[in-house]
Amino acid sequence: MSLFTTKFTSRVVLNSPPFYLRKMARNMSTHYQNLLISRPDPAVLLITLNRPKALNALNKALITEIHQALDQAENDPEIGSIVLTGSERAFAAGADIKEMKDKKCTPAISHEKMILTNDVISVAEVYKSDFLHDWSRITRMRKPTIAAVSGYALGGGCELAMMCDIILASPTAVFGQPEINLGIIPGAGGTQRLTHAIGKSRAMELILTGRDITAQMAEAWGLVSRVVGDGEGEVVKEAVQVASTIASKGQIAIQAAKEAVNASYQLQLEEGLRLERRLFHSLFATKDQKEGMTAFAEKRKPVFTHL
Ligand code: CO8
């Protein structure tokens, strides 16, 4: 198998989400233009990116709707985890290049002024609007998120997948940071998260050449947790199953575990271990800990109440 993919040309794979997803989502997505929303399990929210003609390119409207759906999930006590997916052909082919192409941000006569698009605005205004920052909403989710990736996950699409807690890939998935081909660099975490995931040399090679890698290579390099079976919708089914399993646990412990793992990116080992211990101790104050251990001793399944 070659290390790098060639251009993905098959027209057999579908642009749109599978029929069963569209049917399931019909009644739940009325106010979304670019997403399908469904509950394949009462405790799992499935968010399907749905801009098929643009290969789910991430424009402002789509990003805004993803954030609205995430807020909905975070605020719904019945939802324990979230799956984010695209179509068979594309998870997301990156930020919307056509939307971005005319953006300008050049120093004007004074360093205090910048020109963004056609408006002259001050550095303070650019700073306050925090251009690109809001892409990372998904990383601030307390509930676990799973990316189910088929087809292209390029540029901002790859970055969006990497913002999720777990990435499952279909054998058709293609990952890459091709921004260099457009005269820019990754702007939504690619240089940082990809390097954490696969190491400096591999990240440098992908980012500096703009090449893609296959799902199998992404698995071998540790970018995705695994490649699932072949077939339309398989990666989504598998992701929903993982999400259901996560949602069936005590949610306080789940969120504490997520917090502790994420802290390993920010903290030195000693501090991380201290945080882990403190979270571990605090879980003994929960009803779920009593229930989990009592159920084990009584040889029955625990019934967690998330208290
Ligand atoms: N933006 C806008 N439209 C896109 C994008 C995109 N990223 N990708 C594909 N499309 C559109 C195409 O323009 C085309 O539309 P139309 O039919 O109207 O011409 C349609 O989707 C189908 O695409 P193709 O005909 O090109 O399909 P192919 O199968 O021939 O090729 C590829 C598929 C290889 C995925 C190809 O479309 C491609 O190379 N796309 C661009 C990939 C890319 O460079 N992504 C990185 C974008 S930059 C980025 O993500 C920076 C993120 C940092 C954060 C930014 C915050 C704002």
Image (cartoon, rainbow, N blue to C red):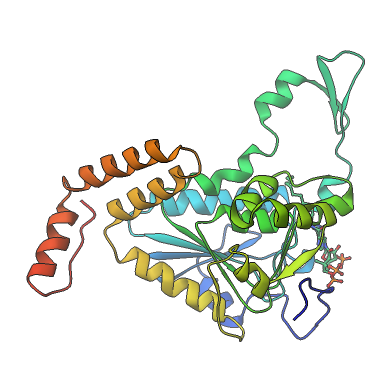
Q: Position of residue 163 (x, y in %)?
A: 57, 52
- Rendered residue at 39%/40% (across/down): 272
Question: Splitting the image into 4 quarters, where does residue 174 fall?
Answer: bottom right
Q: Whole-percent x and y of residue 151?
A: 70, 72
The residue lying toward the viewer, choosing from 70 and 176, is 176
Is residue 112 positioned above or below 266 on the image? above
Placement of 305 over or under 130, stated as above or below: below
Which residue lies at the image location 60% right of the left edge and 86% below the top edge?
Answer: 230
**Front in this rendered view, residue 215 or 307:** 215
Quarter location, residue 104? top right
Q: How many marks?
A: 0
Q: Is residue 304 left or right of residue 36?
A: left
Residue 243 drawn at (x, y percent): 42, 67
Question: Is residue 33 in view from this perspective?
Answer: yes
Residue depicted at x 86% and y 34%: 117
Q: Is residue 65 left or right of residue 212?
A: left
Vertically, is 104 above or below 238? Answer: above
Looking at this view, name the residue that lies furthest to the right: 109
Question: Which one is nearer the viewer's eye here, 50 or 218?
Answer: 218
**x then y, percent, for residue 137:** 55, 44
Ligand 1 is found in the corner quadrant, namely: bottom right
> In the figure, 137 relative to 293: above or below?
above
Seen in the image, is 154 located left or right of residue 39?
Answer: right
Screen quadrant of the N terminus: bottom right
Give the residue at x 89% y 46%. Answer: 183
- Whether residue 42 is visible here, answered yes or no, is no
